[in-house]
Image (cartoon, rainbow, N blue to C red):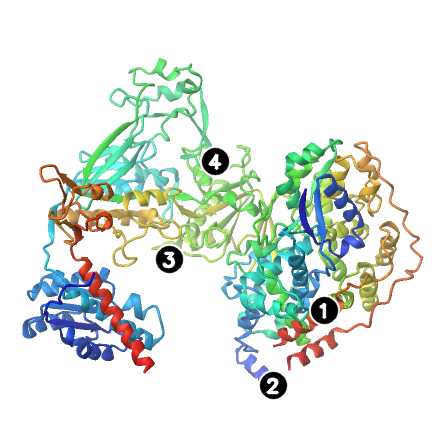
Amino acid sequence: MSDYIFYPGCSMESSAKAYYDSVMSVCQALDIQLNEIDDWNCCGATEYLSLERMPAYALIARNLALAEKQSNGSKTVVAPCSACYLNLAKADHYMHEDKAFGKNINEALAAGGLHYTPGKLAVRHLLDVVLNDIGLEAVKAKVVKPLTGLRVAPYIGCMLPRPDYGNRYSDTENPTELDDLLRALGADVIDFPLRTACCGGHMTQIGPGTAFELIRRLVSTAADQYKADVMVAVCPMCQMNLDAFQGQMNGYFKTDYHMPILFFTQLMGIAFGADAKELGFGSEFVSAREAMSRIGVQTPEPAADAPAKKKPAGLPMPPPLVHASQTTTHSKEAGQ
Amino acid sequence: MPQMIDERAKAGLTPEEDLSLLHEVSMKTAGDSHVEMCIQCGTCGGSCPAGMDMDHTPRAIFAMLRAGMREAVLKSNTPWMCVSCYYCTVRCPQEIHITDVMYTLKNMAVQSGMVQDSTASDFSRTFINFVENYGRSFEIGLAGLHNLIHPRLALRLPNMAPMAIGMLTKKGMSPLPPKRIKGMKGLKKILKRAKELEAA
Amino acid sequence: MSPTKRPKERIGVYVCHCGSNIAGVVDVAEVSAWAGKELEQDGVVVARDYKFMCSSLGQELIERDIKEKGLTRVVVAACSPHLHEPTFRAACARAGVNPYLFEMTNIREQDSWVTTDKIEATKKAKALIAAAVGRVAYQKPLESLYVPIDPNVLVVGGGVTGIQAALEIANSGQHVYLVEREPSIGGHMAQFDKTFPTLDCSACILTPKMFDAGNHKNITLLTWSEVEKVEGYIGNFTVTIRKRARYIDESLCTGCGVCWEKCPKKVVDPVFEAGLGYRKAVYVPFPQAVPKYPVIDRENCTYYLKGTCKACEKFCPTGAIKFDQQDEILTVKVGNIILATGYDLFDARKIPNYGYGRLPNVFTSLEFERMTNAAGPTLGKVVLRDGVTQPKSVAIIHCVGSRDKNYNNYCSGICCMQSLKFAHLVKEKTGGEVYQFYIDMRTPGKTYDEFYQRIIQEGANMIRGKVAEITDTARHPSEEGKLIVQVEDTLVGKQRRIPVDMVVLSAGLEARADAKEVAQKFGISCSADDWFIERHPKLDPVATMTDGVFVAGACQGPKDIPASVAQGAAAAARVLSIIGQGEIEIEAATAIVDEATCVGCKECIASCPYQAIQYLEDKGKAYVQEALCKGCGTCVGTCLPKSISLKHFTDEQIVAEMIGAMQTMKSFETVEAA
């Protein structure tokens, strides 16, 4: 039994429920004990860093401080989301490298009665833990339903191999970790040249034209050039961009791709013999049913699209919006 | 005094002359950004997946920082198009932390009020409002709210609404806001202190 | 131990301004006034400061004081003893003071250059002078030793640099041992087809020199050989060389070539053909190889692998194949050594985004050199990896692995000109489109920029930008089946994707993979990038800090052919000048045994790295051979009864030096406290 401090991240509670379920299933099978950080907060994604530096790092560091307090011997924080992983790693790295900066962040944490010792914890992604702590041999030993015949495009994305503060990955451009893992599950892994290209990040929200082109490059290369059955992601944001926005990307370019985008833990679960429904299959936008049935795995059909005409109802109202211009005034005041 | 500036420009002088700009950017970036070491090779501009849509390549932005062109840099869409893929950062032959510098430029643009198209900064602000009030973020609420602020974007994205519904039906996501963290009071204090330190 | 009673000496102290190098930070006037007053009790009778002590006027100042004021000891506070200790020792000697009664203290490199704090720098200068004054009174007159120079020379590396050096020395009548690791001399230059900027044929200008080196009566050519051990010192080195077995009897072999014609085993040649072509298991690397004898590659030879074959032996008309041949160990004596070990090519596989090793039609510069060589694997045709298709467009990428902190921080110097040469060759041989991707075009050699202009005129497309990536993943139908070079055209300020058929990477030059080991073997040092370090970057570019060991060519840093040849000849000239002197002065600071207390335990003999200590059987005592002793002091530390001391570095001198420094620092503290 290996003990880890677990930082799930916000997506795991909402859009990436399938990821959460499959992570839990796989970790149980591999005897990985995940101890969730009590009362963790959002890492701020790429958004807080875009607005204000110190609050953004303080927000991230609160999680590290809580994790340090709760560590109980374990020094490794595991994050399943690449963006969360990088933010936590980045805060630790800069607090350690830039001592004055680290001191400032700790001064902010002190206002909430917390403290983090830079360099104290190792921040790692679940993929790294499975590969390097559990090992491919142990994974292979758990495989009861090899994924033989399933053509998989391994998509690792940006934020694990880059900038890679801890030198944890084999290459910044062509890391083979995900390939190795999927191969250990028996899958037919394609040599995907875009395995670390960008999924579009937050551009799906703010500049869809830019994002759709990035999604198109990934999906079309995997589908047309490499005839992949499914693409595998290691990050909720990548998965959402490629899955949820694939239909709109098709509309934008007048194309008709149906590339299922799955989490690596979902395929691990299938190979370990878990039930597809418990691994969150059926919650994807682009159905994986046909692809998975090719290797004899039955997965639930995603619920039918809601009628397009139905107005979006019942969305919650958030607290009053502080507009950008007001933010400016606010920070100026703080400066005086 | 715009007239003065025009005269300078006519005489062939740099319209703005803010040679401390580069240093300021460096100071406002965590760690050692090495931004002053740029050799203008263009590895960043060549690597950028969003480079086609930027009005200046990152390399050109660094040249403009050197030339002290504060307004042109802070009004540029370049940092807002950054997708944080870190290709430029790992490929840069001078080890400049380019992605982090892009974050700094966004901070400076928001704080100076020079942001031209506020689509991106408003998205960030909406996102952060959830975080500052709940301690957690909330994707569905975010997409809906963001579209309310930016109907232009919703027009560009005719399918946005069905997607939000899909989120509810396929993913079984809760339409309620995220649960507020227990330590919200402490987090607010931390963020308040951090904002004071940032402004200091 | 405390020093014995201080001898009464008359000491002169001279503080150098070194222009503003020292005087800009250290208050030199104050320092000399202080020395004259505060160190009077220690024997200082005169203290002066002067703008340039090393000038003739500065030296005359010392000589005059020695004569007029009867100085018996001299202290100069100036730069590093590396630079001017010989200057001032000579001045003392001219005025009749033994050179070893002079002491130099460094207030520049170790003081004014390393701080901007004028007050602290001035204090440190005083402390250093007090230390030198402290020790100088205890110094003893010593006589330098002179040893004869062995006129034989060792040249390591048989590329164009080593060949040049060897020929210069051999032509003057001295004997040279030219040692080369590969089966033939010729080095990288033998692999090239054309040389910039004149485009003359590389083989045409190199092979006559190779032939001369191979047939010179004053050159012993040892190829397929490596230096294993170096002992001794300038004038008297003993070098152990391993001459690896070729499995060929050189006295019988005529170089007819039947053996490699008949050999059934074909292997990729990673060295001479840069991995682009094949050779046999018994081979000469290229037709003009010197010497003409082949080598059997034991690792690939079927006979050594399986015990059968022997095709070469069957067909050899002179019976020269000797499967049981053994390595030979040779010992040679030389007076000087020139290292000309060259460079390795940067391994372009390290840059994942350039796809070398993954994308077949990405080539390195050395592969391209072989491809364009009429005697190379494609007989000079420029073709894709399939061996037949002529490319319609070629991208040539500069600075691959150079000027990049992720790989090598330095400029490799030769790549711009080499890439321009490639552009010409592509145009000449294919008529296709050529793109040059460069960061800065660096063409400072004689007629180099004219060559650049010629290539522009020939129609090469020049794109200023460091290439971001090379990919075969098409985004658009027009890119399909091509290699796409993605780059920011920095002069336009836009990202561009340029589809081409072939990419050539101008890979940078790196120090040899084993440069550190080689440096250690010869007692010299390497820079952070593993290049051999010269004695002085401007004024002594081919000497090293180890007397009698010289460096030339690309082993000292990236260099093109003209610069390498010039250094080879320069190193030869330096060596010939030493040989011409006949004998050389050896520093007198050697170890000496006090026979009265030596117990004959032999600990010192075991500890001496230079084998300079003998055991005198008749007396039962240790004895130091002065000519072999380098004055390192290791034996002094191991001698339990303290019978060994180092002349010029006695305990008494060192303790006096420390007391001088510490008392001065202490006095400052007292003053500050008060």
Give the vertical position of A223 relative to B60 (above or below).
Answer: above
Which badge, 2 or 1, is on the more N-terminal residue?
2
Apparent side of residue C10 relative to residue C446 in the rendered image (left or right):
left
> Few, some or many C-alpha atoms within 10 Å of disc 1 (few <14, some 14-19, many ≥20)?
some
Q: Chain of mark 3?
A: C
Q: Position of residue C486 (x, y in %)?
A: 59, 51
| Marks 1 and 3, how far apart at CA | 64 Å
The residue under label 3 is: C444
Circles 1 and 3 in contact, beta carbons < 8 Å: no
Give the vertical position of C670 relative to C137 (above or below).
Answer: below
Circles 4 and 2 in contact, beta carbons < 8 Å: no
What residue is rendered at 56% in x and 45% in y? C352
| Marks 2 and 3, how far apart at CA | 45 Å
Q: Position of residue A189 (x, y in %)?
A: 68, 36
In terms of depth relative to the viewer, which is nearer, A242 or C530? C530
Q: Is residue A186 visible?
A: no
